[in-house]
Each structure stands twice: as C-alpha cells, then as structure tokens.
Image: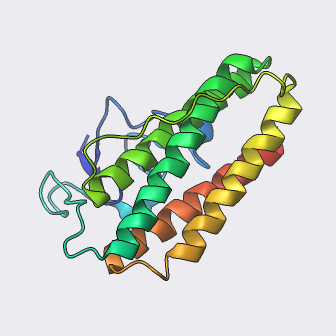
Amino acid sequence: MINYICTICGMIINDKNFDFNKEVLPYENSIDNIKYCPFCGADSTFIKKVDQGEGAEIKLTAENMDNATSVIIDHAMKLEVFNGDFYKKASKLAKNDEIKIMFQCLSNIEYMHARIHKSIGGFKELPVLREMDYCKYGEDAMLMDLANKREKHAVEYYDRYAEEVCSHKIKEIFNALSRVEKGHMDLTLKK
C-alpha cells in the first residue's frame, strides 16, 4: 500500500491503520481507496500520497498568530477535550454494544481534534478539565441526545469562528472539522 498523509491532522495512513475508527466514518476505507482520515475524520480532499504532500510531515503550527486566534484555538481545544472526555465516559455507560463502540471511536476522533488545536496553538499539553458525571444519562437514548447536542455545538463553534481566525490554513482546518462534526451529528441521530 502507498502511504498517505492527512493534511488536517498530519497522521500517516497505511495498511496497518486505514480502518481505525471505521464504525464512525461515513464510508469504510479500503487499502486501495482512502475516503476519510481514520484519525480525524477529514475527507479525501485532505488525504495526499506522501510523495504528493510535503514529505512525511505536515506543519500544523500557525506562524504569526494573533491573540484573538490563539484564544479561539484554545477554546476549540478545550471543546474537543470536553467532548472526548464525554464520549470516553459514555462508552462505559452505554448498554448497546454498537453504541459503546461508536462512542469509543468518537472519543478517539475528538481527542485527535484537540491534538490538532494543541499543535496549531503551540500549546505544551492538552488541558485536564473538571471531571464530569454522566450517570444521570443512564439510557442510551439520553446519551445519544447529549452527544448530538455536543456535535451541534462543535459545528456552530467551527462555523462561527472560521471567519475570525487570522490564517487561511486554520480556516481550512475549522471548515474540515466542521464537516466531520456534521457527520457525527447525523450519526448520533441514527442510532
């Protein structure tokens, strides 16, 4: 298999990982046809052969970032950590095995989104947020409803702030992540 790279998250996609998180991608990847990044969920528009990309590394740091953009990136990182934490806990609370797996995969992708923001913003580490208790959402339907609200909020955040960031690359990343989150909204309505 030819190695590919995602220009949104910078991860290398190969024959060992092309099907990670397949349960939450709109279409399954195959070795010969990578439709989505298995790490961040970005579509094939952002998937390049390694020799077509900028080598085997994508630079995710934004140079000359203004203070307003830095704050937007910091909040986006916290939003994604918050959602990743939720999905991690929801995967343990869900009763249906399919929903458990879906939440685990969504957690992986949300944490990758947080790592993208960490890199862009030049932050040293991901924030550790206050521990939340989701036990009162004891039914899968309640967890799915909460998941859908979180995805909707993420879409609204990216759509709102894509126009306010100081960099075309960050705007491109926000637009790509908004599309991923829209797919997650659809997914959390289906189950």
Query: Could you say where residue 47 lies in the image, as x and y percent from the top left?
Result: 35, 58
Q: Is residue 64 shown above or below 139?
A: below
* Residue drawn where x is 45% and y is 34% of the image: 128
Q: Can residue 182 be seen by looking at this rendering?
A: no
Which part of the image, by quadrant, shows the N terminus? top left
**Residue 104's image quarter?**
top right
In the image, taking residue 92 as reference, residue 189 lies left or right, namely right
* Residue drawn where x is 32% and y is 79% of the image: 167
Task: Give the tally of numbered discs.
Answer: 0
Q: Is residue 25 shown above or below 175?
A: above
Q: Is residue 92 shown above or below 132?
A: above
* Display colour scheme: rainbow
Q: Can residue 7 be seen by looking at this rendering?
A: yes
Query: Could you say where residue 33 lies in the image, as x and y percent from the top left?
Result: 42, 49
**Residue 3's image quarter?**
top left
* Residue drawn where x is 87% and y is 33% of the image: 141
**Residue 71's image quarter?**
bottom left
17 and 185: which is toward the camera: 185
Q: Is residue 53 shown above or below 80?
A: below
Which part of the image, by quadrant, shows the C terminus? top right
148 and 23: which is toward the camera: 148
Query: Could you say where residue 140 lies in the image, as x and y percent from the top left?
Result: 83, 27
110 and 137: which is toward the camera: 137
Query: Could you say where residue 147 lies in the image, as x and y percent from the top left?
Result: 73, 42
* Residue drawn where x is 66% and y is 50% of the image: 184
